[in-house]
Image (tube, rainbow, N blue to C red):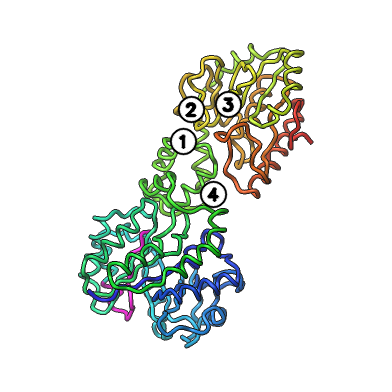
Amino acid sequence: MNKISLLDCTLRDGGYINDWRFGEKAICDITKKLVQAGIEYLEIGFVRDCVYDKDCSLFNGNESVKHVIAPKCPGTQYVGMIDMGKPMPLEKLGKRQKDGFDVFRVIFKKPKLEEAYDYIQKLLELGYVVFAQLVGTDSYSDKEFIEAIEKFNQLDISAFSIVDSFGLIKKNDFLRLVQIADNNLREGIGLGYHSHNNMQQAFGNAVAMTELNLKRDIILDACVFGMGRGAGNLNLELFAQHMNENFGKHYQIEPMLEIIDEYLNDIYRNHFWGYSLPLYLAAVNGCHPNYAIYFASKGTLTVKSYNEILRGIPEEDKAKFSKEKAEDIYVKYQEKFIDDKEALDELEKQFSGKEILLLGPGKSLNTETKRIRAFIEEKKPVVIALNFVPENYKCDYVFSCHMRRYKDIQDRKDVKKIVTSNMREAENYEYKLNFSSYAAKSKEIMENAGLMCINLLMSLGVKRVNLAGLDGYDTENRGNYLNSGLEYDFTPEVLKIRNQLIREEMKKQREQIELNFITESVYES
């Protein structure tokens, strides 16, 4: 077996978490600490045709990176990544410079293979060390994989990498790819592995690769604290320790821990990465992890729903994510039509000529108890709770469009249940309504229970609805729900946007129905 090296890609792959905006001081300091740690390959960031911003780990050539890596350490190779989806113009990059990038990793999807080959050939002519990185290596058949290897054997590349783009390559399949590569790559080309941790395979696969006694150099990608989009990557500090204990390496772990303590912990608190059920399901279903991240942001899907919606994505779309495509898939999933005429006729009879009171889950239900009880005593309204059943008030109905929350109340026999058709798993309800008929107009808040219930009441001819506990999202303290099970998981910026969108929808609703707020709400004005 030849040399095993580690390649850190925290500033590049980790940058998906914070839009590469680490800050100039952090970028320079993280770089210095990784050099102190003894990491052989240090990937500083993406290299793109962009306006250079010193606070971002995105570079537009050698000049922009010089101040970050100076003075260069002789034992470290300084790496940039070039994505063939938007390659850096070679005329702007220029020849290799002693105080600039040493290595370029060129990453490309299968349709870009020929274009990547030509680009790499020109990079080599400019004097750079080059690694070829096959995005979604597991999407290649064995025959296609061997053909790709044989093609790049014709170039003087230094490494050829297996890239587990969606974190779904299991150990046996991974080792088969490793052995195919080891047996077919020409002598002198190293073999790399870039992992993602959706199914927690990264560490085990990397260990297995090091134990194969390959006849060539191995380069293993990792990130400090596992920082990376979605489930993250192989943890550099953990694997470096493994290498120290089992392969006689002498990586310094403390500088890596200092990076976590001084820089990454703060990012982690605001932008979580790591194992999650949605990302696991994305990997199981062979989908781009951004689908899982996007659908999770909706906050409405159960595990069964996640599996169903991910499984239903057309094969040709699973590997390529776009927000527009994800939104279209989500809307179509939610809008599965049902005929709800009979349910509407019955509800119209129940609500006709009566005062209606909607109860949201805001804390004002507790702080304004006297006011709410006085209203109920005087008006004798039909009381409809939204996605929950309050403890302190007797409800006639509960309106639910949120399967995760409905699971907690579907066995209640003391209240009639109105559910929407997107809740395919719902049981024990009295009325099911067609989701798309009452969904809010804005896609970001289409499943907001308050807006949907008001739309339902308007369709039934109700002229006035009274509201309590619809406090609005608390963008600072995140503590305006009655219990933690009803809490939300959005950033303050998203909460502000959602408040504004709901306020705008209610303004339009007021053109057709009177909204009387009994308790204070951010939506009142």
Residue 292 spot, x, y in % from top left: 46, 47
Disc 4 is placed on an element classified as helix
Q: How many angstroms separate mark 1 from mark 2 (CA)?
A: 9 Å
> Mark 2 packing: few (<14 Cα in 10 Å), some, or many (20+)?
some
Residue 1: numbered disc: none
Name the residue beneath numbered marker 1. 302
Name the residue beneath numbered marker 3. 388
Q: How many angstroms separate mark 3 from mark 2 (CA)?
A: 10 Å
User: The disc labelled 2 sits on which kind of residue?
Assistant: Lys
N-terminal-most mark, 2 or 4: 4
Name the residue beneath numbered marker 4. 324
Disc 1 is placed on an element classified as loop
Name the residue beneath numbered marker 2. 407
Query: Depth check: 379 or 262 in front?
Result: 262
Residue 515 in sight from this viewpoint? no
Q: Is residue 180 above or below residue 522?
A: below
Mark 3, mark 4: which one is toward the viewer?
Answer: 3
Residue 436 spot, x, y in % from top left: 57, 31
- Toward the right, the furthest residue is 525
Question: Residue at left 54%, top 41%?
Answer: 298
Range drawn in magenta: 150-165
User: The disc labelled 1 sits on which kind of residue?
Assistant: Thr
